[in-house]
Image (cartoon, rainbow, N blue to C red):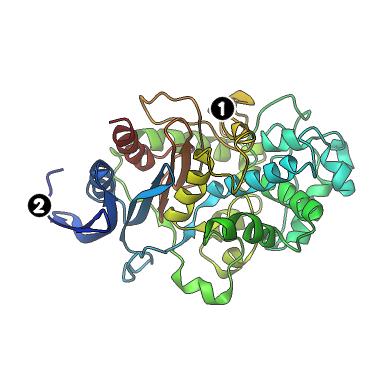
Amino acid sequence: MNVPWRLSDRLKGGHFLYDVHFKSQGVKAVLIEGSVSLGFEGVKQAFTELFTDYHEVGAAVSLVHRGVTVVDLWAGSRDKAEAQPWRQDTRSNVFSASKAVVAIAILQLVEKRLLSLEQPVADLWPEFAQNGKQDITVRQVLTHRSGVNAFQGKVPDTAIYDWSMATGLIAQESPWWEPGSEQGYSPILFGWILGELVCRVSGCNSFNDYVAQNIARPLGLGWKFGLSSGELAGIADMAPLKVPKSAAVNNVKSGSLLTNAILGNPQGVTAKAFANPPSLMIGTNGVPWRQAQIPAANGHASAADLAIFYGALADLDDERLLTAEARSWCWEEQTQGQDNVLHCPLSLSLGFMRLLPRNIQSERFFCHPGAGGSLGYADASEGFGFGYATRAMGQSITLDDRADHLLQAVYAAVRD
């Protein structure tokens, strides 16, 4: 799309500050704010194109390269009425991108030898041993091979907001298949299983307490599970990404696979994993959701939080989260193949997905996308951590077209 726009750049502290205004037929005037270092202007251009070509309404992108923030941009609105502007520190629900924090919490405890990857979960949580789960290991949960993917029976809507109720129900569950025999993504239960282990092993009163002390505070992050009343007003509202039928073909196709699996077999594992209870699908803008601790799905973070977190993992000299020796756990493949829940091929490391943008090759990469499009991503071979946060929810299962578009520009910049 050819869009008339005005660019004013002012050099400040080694960064260019961009004020980009564009207005065209069907496109509202949008102000893009933030900073971009020399050599990374292509990422700014790609971010601008999200609003002109990809129907973005409110989002941010951030990039940390070799320990330095080189891109930090935001634009659009953060509320349903599109009256409140997105700000530098705006946090949104990044959904399953939250799982990265869960994974690192577990890997920190493994590195400290407070638990083992091969240890049965039931060694630390005896109630979990019920109904054929006694031998499920920490590794199997981290790699989505536990078979504990979803609640099988009907669950009250309120269960997802009550940690004790949720973990109590999980303890009574049976695996959907023989643990370790097949790969099946666990969109929600993953977080409570591993989060309960974090609490039991660390002695912290809650999962969020552990994150605050061992992940957020050392990095200066605002990433949080369970918001206080005073934090609710600044959170971005989630809404469907409004695209024409001809747009985002890959996302529509991948989203349709999941939708067909849910609608075609309402009692199957995919339907149960994403829609049991129904509050998983309809409660995400509500106060109960935002104030609960649902580690696999309701972390609230900014794009900068995502980039700083992944940037620390991509920089092998930065040992605030994991030592350099332990870092390979993040990118080394543990399992791959057709996923029984997502119905697509998937490669996984210990708690992370191994996804690459189209036509990009690399070695030490890892990430976790969130429902709707948000993404945290690292490439230790190139030394960068990337974060994209959006409130416009697309239909992608794994790598959203918008995130892919941004990453194409990131790789072009770091490899130039």
Q: Is residue 38 above or below residue 260?
A: below
Question: Residue placed at 55% from the left, 28% from the top?
Answer: 346
Q: Is residue 28 left or right of residue 218?
A: left
Q: Quadrant of the C terminus?
A: top left
- State the mark number for residue 347: 1
Between residue 308 and residue 191, name the one nearer to us: 308
Q: Is residue 72 left or right of residue 259?
A: left
Q: CA distance from mark 1 to mark 2?
A: 42 Å
Question: Residue placed at 61% from the left, 42% from the top?
Answer: 271
Q: Position of residue 317 (x, y in %)?
A: 53, 40
Residue corresponding to mark 2: 4
Q: Position of residue 53 (x, y in %)?
A: 24, 45
Q: Is residue 357 left or right of residue 371?
A: left
Q: Earlier in the sequence, mark 1 or mark 2?
A: 2
Question: Residue placed at 43% from the left, 53% from the top?
Answer: 303
Tell me the quarter of the picture where residue 214 sits: bottom right
Q: Secondary structure at mark 1?
A: strand
Tell me the quarter of the picture where residue 138 sits: top right
Q: Quadrant of the N terminus?
A: top left
Q: Is residue 250 among the parts visible in the rendering?
A: yes
Mark 2 closeness class: few <14, some 14–19, many ≥20 residues within 10 Å:
few
Q: Secondary structure at mark 2?
A: loop
Q: Three-letter amino acid code at disc 2? A: Pro
Q: Is residue 147 among the parts visible in the rendering?
A: no
Q: Position of residue 384 (x, y in %)?
A: 43, 40
- State the mark number for residue 273: none
Q: Is residue 194 above or below residue 254?
A: below
Between residue 187 and residue 264, name the one nearer to us: 187
Q: Three-letter amino acid code at disc 1? A: Ser
Q: Are marks 1 and 2 in contact (CB under 8 Å)?
A: no
Tell me the quarter of the picture where residue 217 sits: bottom right
